[in-house]
Amino acid sequence: MVRFCLRRLLTLIPVTLGVTFLLFSLLYMTPGDPALLVLGPEATEDALREFRREHGLDQPFLVRYGRFVYNAVVHQDVGRSYITHRTVASEIADAFPVTLTLSIGAIFFATLMGMIFGIICAVKQYSIFDNVAMVFAMLGIATPVFYLGILLILLFSVHLHWLPSSGFDTPAQRILPWIALSSVSLSIITRMTRSSMLEVIRSDYIRTARAKGQKETVIIVKHALRNALIPIITIIGIQFGHLLGGSILAESVFSIPGVGRLAVDAIKSRDYPVVQGAVIYLALAYVLINLLVDILYTWIDPRLRTRYR
Amino acid sequence: MDQQQRENFLEIRDLYVQYHTDTGLVKAVDGLNLSLAGGETLGLVGETGAGKTTTALAVMQLIASPPGRIAGGSIFLQGENLLKKSKEEQRHIRGGKIAMIFQDPMTSLNPVLPVQEQIAEMIRLHRKADADEVLKKARDMLSLVGIRPERGSEYPHQFSGGMKQRVVIAIALACNPTLLIADEPTTALDVTIQAQVLELMRELRQHFNTSTILISHDLGVVAELCDSVAIMYAGRIVEKADTKNLFRRPLHPYTQGLFRSVPDLTGNVRRLDTIAGLPPDPTNLPPGCCFASRCNIAEPDCSRSRPSMIEGETGHFAACFKLGKRGGV
């Protein structure tokens, strides 16, 4: 198990290299001059040239990429923001906890409610609850986060004055972003739980458990749910990754200073170091979540344990 | 158990079980009568779709609803009608008094639980015992079915098919049920393992003195293990007798056809007989004798009304009109 984890952690190296290389290529091809954007249209030609030279922007692509990797590996330094002049690490350190709180809250809510709804739907298949829940799940998947966010603000902030419309410091400020961000994941987890449970409920070992005289609730939780968990956990992992990367929509609507907003603002102002830092952090988070999901697999299903030795 | 209870240990009267499907109402069990004496082993024989498993599930109160439904009849176990019991009472009878061994050991164990836990669960449900006692009993059951108790903490995928079926048998017998229903317990196993499992079942039956219904379509297995045999066709019992009589002199034309389709090592037969035609469509059972269309001695009268069970010899019953007319077929 330890060896498996170490091996998976080693894959972080090629993943990170690949992600940064792709990112460098994209930024290189993106039109727009950081020097002009940072110094403004009145800057002199000399000042612009000086800015480009100072930040290495006049160098060829491969040299810039090589320098970035060298600095990151040897000095653990991914650069400073062109605009705020703070280190990228500290910019991210400020923004990442916010995004993490937002995403963890949303995935927790989505998992809890999604699994409860999904189990009820499966146990009471074709009931009114099942039909209504499936319609809402469809709506939830089809409604974009920013649209739902705006609707929630209109209803709960503008009309009812129950909850604040922006910020992320108090619990009250967090409720609407969590709901808006979790709606898609909630719907997907509900549908996945339902279909996975339906498959398991019909299997022979569930009939064996009934033949023992076991209580129906115990059969559902102890026998059925655990067998149905693998696809559910997989989808939760993927959704959590999506939330970390996609929280930008909720962050924009609710004015939350998270990594998504940081990245988008940085892209707008061609603040290359910050863009690189933000994307690397998200990529690392993605890989670590997937590792966690793989470890959970082996905990749930003994048949997978031998495979991960 | 007094004499009365011993004789009518299990009594199924006019049982009807139906499944609602897209193609219509499937009458899987259609007016079945069957009784079993205490300590007896009864073989329930019939081809696929005859309603054997449905009958077993009805006794277990495990008919999936929807689509299934027990549409009528009664099932008495030691004088008590199981169909009149509350859900909670039925739950205590399942596993505690009536246990079932399922057909396919590959799929009837939960893949994510250690096998000893799956046995322990049964014990916990029906016996009062602390955790240590339950675990010890579960491991005792394992060694009783010939599995080293140390393997109890392993998972089903670490066992072979025959070993899994032994675990299933251990689960079924863990609470010493009065009635054991074994639904084709050896069909999914290869022949050498079949023999081992049958031998095990024979030993355990003597050990526990459990009344048993053995569902099978293997006449050889039935001859080996059963005291009496009931032949099932299209949701009904068409013949019932003790094993010796039935094998010596089958009375119902369907049973006779079944025996002709079994290879006989002493004769020099090149081609086995088959019964022409197919069983009737269970969504559309004929009004008369269900076997009439395939029967080579059928008369037009046979298709008018259902034949009831007639005692052809002492203790040997068959549902055939011809038997009543001539005193034998």
Image (tube, rainbow, N blue to C red):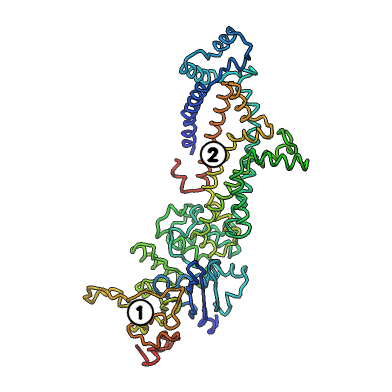
**SS class of the residue under badge 2?**
helix
Q: Quadrant of residue B200?
A: bottom left
Position of A26 with respect to B324 (left or right) is: right
- How many numbered circles are shown? 2
The CA span between labels 1 and 2 is 63 Å
Nearer to me, A283 or A260 = A260
Q: What label does residue A292 carry, if any? A: 2
Question: Quarter of the image holding residue A83?
Answer: top right
Which of B151 and A208 lies nearest the eye of the viewer?
A: A208
Find residue A71 and report its horizontal and vertical position in percent.
Answer: 52, 18
Instruction: Give the structural element (helix, strand or loop) at label 1.
Output: helix
Considering only vertical position in the picture, is A168 above or below B256? above
Between B88 and B150, the one nearer to me in the picture: B88
Image: B161 above or below A142: below
Q: Mark 1 points at which residue?
A: B294
Relative image position of residue B61 (x, y in whole percent): 55, 70
Task: Tell me the chain of label 1.
Answer: B
Image quadrant for the C terminus of chain B? bottom left
Q: Within 10 angstroms of label 1, few (less than 14), some, or many (20 or more) residues?
A: some
Please check whether the numbered discs 1 and 2 fall on a single chain.
Answer: no
Image position, residue A17 (x, y; %): 48, 26
Residue beneath the point at 64% across and 28% down? A95
- Count residues near mark 2 (Cα–Cα under 10 Å), then give few for <14, some for 14-19, many for 20+: few
